[in-house]
Image (cartoon, helix red, strand yellow):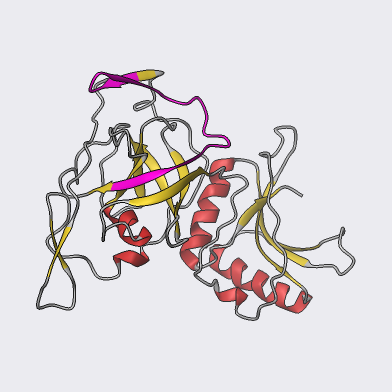
């Protein structure tokens, strides 16, 4: 299968414009910078199988051989991030998907496709989450190519590049760090969240999605009823048993299949519950 590789886009240049939205002129930037693109929601990590395309054991570009990693586990890398936009918008990525410069995606030389990564701007501390679905950038001094939207959110557009840390995410243990506040956290009653390190056992194991942990059983039941009405699926309140002062855990499920749990977690995210995580007990 022929793979499509992308070159480093030309660094964006700013023009002074008589409009409230800044205009950008570059082979890789839209003529008008979309309003609020810096607020594009992060990619939501979920368990996915490796793509059929884009994951050869090795491949060659410009006479250099690259070796695709068998796993993204514990992957951390620091270096320079660049970005790409209109020049490739609508074209095929390395795994056969259509590149959307307004999605939170990225290209990496060696990470398995797809991989979810947290990218931190080391100059500002800003963090974003993107889904790697492409190969590149093929320059020795660049480690990741961000989509236009991802670069806007991270603050990379102004200079064209940023010094970053790229850290692979395990969807099963990831806890959302979004600054967006879910509706149920406004009373500041949530004080504990749990995560799991392994998927549920195939021998009768069940997976739950924990949406909140409350000191007050009344607040926990309030959220339970809200979720039951919104999701039309079982929601339970479970007292934690391993703490001196018990917390009341609000959980959606149980689920046997990971794909069903992923669908429910995505729905929760769309409803505004962005701190939902997995648990097994």
Depth check, front residue: 63 or 198: 63
The residue that appears at 12% across and 54% down in the rendered structure is 26
- Indicate the quadrant containing the N terminus: top left, top right, bottom left or bottom right: top left
Q: Position of residue 156 (x, y in %)?
A: 31, 56
Q: Quadrant of residue 201?
A: top right
Residue 26, magenta (yes or no): no
The residue that appears at 47% across and 26% down in the rendered structure is 69
Q: Position of residue 173 (x, y in %)?
A: 63, 47
Q: Position of residue 53 (x, y in %)?
A: 34, 26
Side of 249 relative to 79 (left or right): right
Side of 37 relative to 226 (left or right): left
Q: Quadrant of residue 210?
A: bottom right
Depth check, front residue: 281 or 204: 281
Q: Position of residue 68 (x, y in %)?
A: 42, 25
Residue at the extreme bottom: 187
Query: Where does the magenta region start and end?
Result: 59-82
Residue 81, magenta (yes or no): yes
- Vertical relation: 245 (above or below) 102: below
Depth check, front residue: 95 or 169: 169
Q: Quadrant of residue 59?
A: top left
- Vertical relation: 162 (above or below) 142: below
């Amino acid at each position: 299968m022929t793979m499509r590789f992308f070159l480093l886009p030309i660094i964006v240049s700013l023009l002074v414009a008589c409009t409230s939205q800044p205009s950008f002129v570059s082979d890789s930037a839209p003529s008008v910078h979309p309003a609020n693109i810096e607020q594009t929601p992060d990619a939501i990590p979920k368990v996915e199988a490796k793509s059929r395309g884009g994951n050869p054991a090795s491949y060659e570009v410009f006479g250099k051989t690259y070796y695709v990693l068998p796993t993204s586990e514990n992957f951390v890398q620091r270096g320079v991030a660049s970005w790409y936009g209109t020049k490739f918008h609508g074209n095929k990525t390395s795994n056969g998907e259509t590149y959307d410069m307004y999605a939170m995606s990225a290209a990496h030389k060696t990470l398995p496709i797809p991989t979810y990564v947290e990218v931190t701007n080391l100059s500002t501390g800003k963090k974003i989450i993107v889904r790697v679905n492409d190969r590149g950038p093929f320059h020795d001094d660049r480690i990741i190519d961000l989509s236009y939207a991802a670069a806007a959110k991270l603050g990379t557009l102004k200079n064209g590049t940023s010094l970053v840390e790229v850290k692979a995410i395990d969807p099963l243990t990831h806890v959302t760090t979004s600054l967006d506040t879910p509706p149920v956290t406004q009373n500041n009653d949530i004080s504990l969240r749990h995560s799991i390190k392994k998927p549920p056992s195939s021998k009768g194991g069940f997976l739950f999605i924990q949406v909140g942990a409350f000191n007050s059983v009344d607040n926990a039941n309030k959220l339970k009823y809200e979720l039951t009405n919104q999701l039309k699926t079982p929601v339970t309140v479970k007292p934690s048993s391993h703490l001196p002062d018990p917390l009341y855990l609000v959980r959606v499920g149980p689920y046997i299949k990971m794909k069903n749990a992923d669908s429910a977690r995505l729905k929760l995210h769309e409803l505004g519950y962005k701190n939902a995580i997995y648990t097994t007990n």
